[in-house]
Amino acid sequence: MMNKNDTEKGSTLLIPLLIIGVLFFVIGFGVGISGFLTPFLKDALHLTEAQSYLVTAAIFSAFVIFGSPAGWVIKKIGYKKSIVIALIIMAAGMILFVPSANAASYPVFLLALFVGGIGNTLLQASVNPYVTIIGPHESAAARMCMMGIMNKLAWWLGPLFLGLFLDLKNVHLNQVAFPFYIVTGILLILSLFIYFSPLPEVKAAGEDETGEIATSKYATDKTSIFQLPHLLLGAFALFLYTGVETLPMASIIGFAKTIYGSNLANPEGFAKYVPIGMFVGYIFCVVMTPRFISQTKALKMLTIIALIASFCVVLLPGAIGIYALIAIGFANSIMWGALWALTIADLGKFTKSGASLLVMSIVGGAVIPLIFGFLIDSFKTGEVATMADYQQAYWIFIPAYLYILYFATFGHKIRK
C-alpha cells in the first residue's frame, strides 16, 4: 500500500519526468527524421563502401572524443544548462544538413553528423544519470524504460511526419531542406523550454560528501574513476550492450535476404521486428519493476532470455531463428537502464565523470557491428554471404551476453 510519503515523492518526480519525457520524444523524433533521410543523402552523394564507414565513424567518434569534456561541462554548469547547450549544438548539426544537401557536399555532410554527435554526447551524459538518480535507485530501470518508450514512439513517427512534405519513394536533395529547418526549430524551441522549465538540479547520493562525513568510503577515498572497479566493469558491459542492441537492427534485413533470397518481396519489412520487441520489453519493464521483480533480477532474467534466443539464431534453421532476433530485442529493452543504474551506484563525487565514461562506451554500437561484418567476410567462401555465414557471425552475441550476465550477477557487487 502506498503511503503519504510515497505519494508526495511521486508527485515531486512527475513534473521533471514529464519534461525529460518530452525531451526524449522530441530527440527521438529528430533522430527518426535524420536517420530516415541519411540513406538518401548517402545515395545522392554517391558514396563508396569505404566512405560509408566514415558516416558511422563521424557519429560515434564524437562520443569518444567529447565523452570526457561532457562530464567537465556538467560539473561546471549542472544538468539543466548542459541539456540546453546540447540541444543548441544538435540544432546546429541539423541545420548543417541543409548546405550539405544543397551543395551535395560530402565533407559538410560528415561535419553535420559530427556536430550532431557532439550535442548527442553532452545530452546523453546529462539525461541518463539525471533520470537514474532523480528517484529511487530500485526503480531507475523502469524510469529509463519510460524514456525509451517516448523515444522509440517518436522515432517511428518521424517518417510519417516526412510523408506530409516529401514523396518518400522518390526523395530529391533539393526537397530535404524544409524538414531539417523544422527539426532545427523544434530543437531550439525545446532548448528555450528546458531553460525556463522548473527542472530541478539533482545530485547523486554522496556527491558532495568528503572525508569524515562521507557515508561510504567506496568513492570518497579515491582520486580517479579508474580506481572504481565496478564502474570499469559496468562501462565494458555497456560497451557490449550498445553493440548487441545495434547489431540485430542493423543486420536483420541482410539476414532475411540470405534466408528467403529473391522470393522475399519486402525485405525492409523485417526492420520493424527488433524495435517492436524492444517496445514490448519497455512496457514489461515499466509494469514489472520494481513492483514484482527487482531491476537486478529482471536484468539477469532477460539476459538469460537473450542468451537462449542467441543460440536459437545460430543453431535453428534461419526461417525460424530470424524471429529469435525479436526476443533479443525484447531482452535488450531493460539492459540500458539497469546497467546505468548498477554502474553509477555509489560513485558519489565521481558520478558525472562516471557518466561521461559510460557515454564513451556507446562507441560499442559502431565497433560490434563492424566486427560482425568482418566475421561474415572471413566466413564466406563466395561473392555473396550465405545464411550460414550470418549464423556463424552471430556467435558474437554469446560472449557479450555472458559478460553482461556476469556483471548483473557478480560484477556490480564489487563496490560492496
Image (spheres, rainbow, N blue to C red):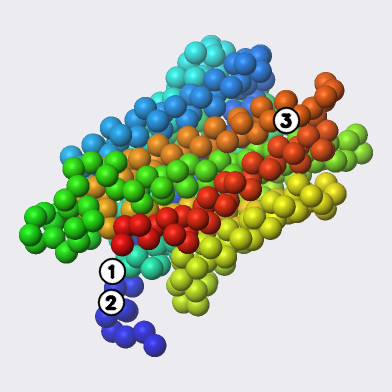
Q: Is residue 244 left or right of residue 386?
A: left
The residue lying at 80 percent from left, 41 percent from top is 256
Q: Position of residue 371 (x, y in %)?
A: 61, 31
Q: Is residue 384 left or right of residue 416?
A: right
The residue lying at 48 percent from left, 29 percent from top is 59
Per the model, the C-alpha gap separating discs 3 and 1 is 51 Å
Extreme residue toward the right, this view = 263
Per the model, the C-alpha gap separating discs 2 and 1 is 6 Å
The residue lying at 35 percent from left, 57 percent from top is 414
Say if mark 2 contacts mark 1, CB within 8 Å.
Answer: yes
Asked if residue 153 shows in the view, the reply is no
Residue density around tag 2, few if under 14, some if 14–19, many if 20 or more, within 10 Å: few
In this rendering, the answer to whether 306 lies above or below 384 is below
In this rendering, the answer to whether 89 lies above or below 6 is above
Label 3, on which residue? Answer: 376
Label 1, on which residue? Answer: 12
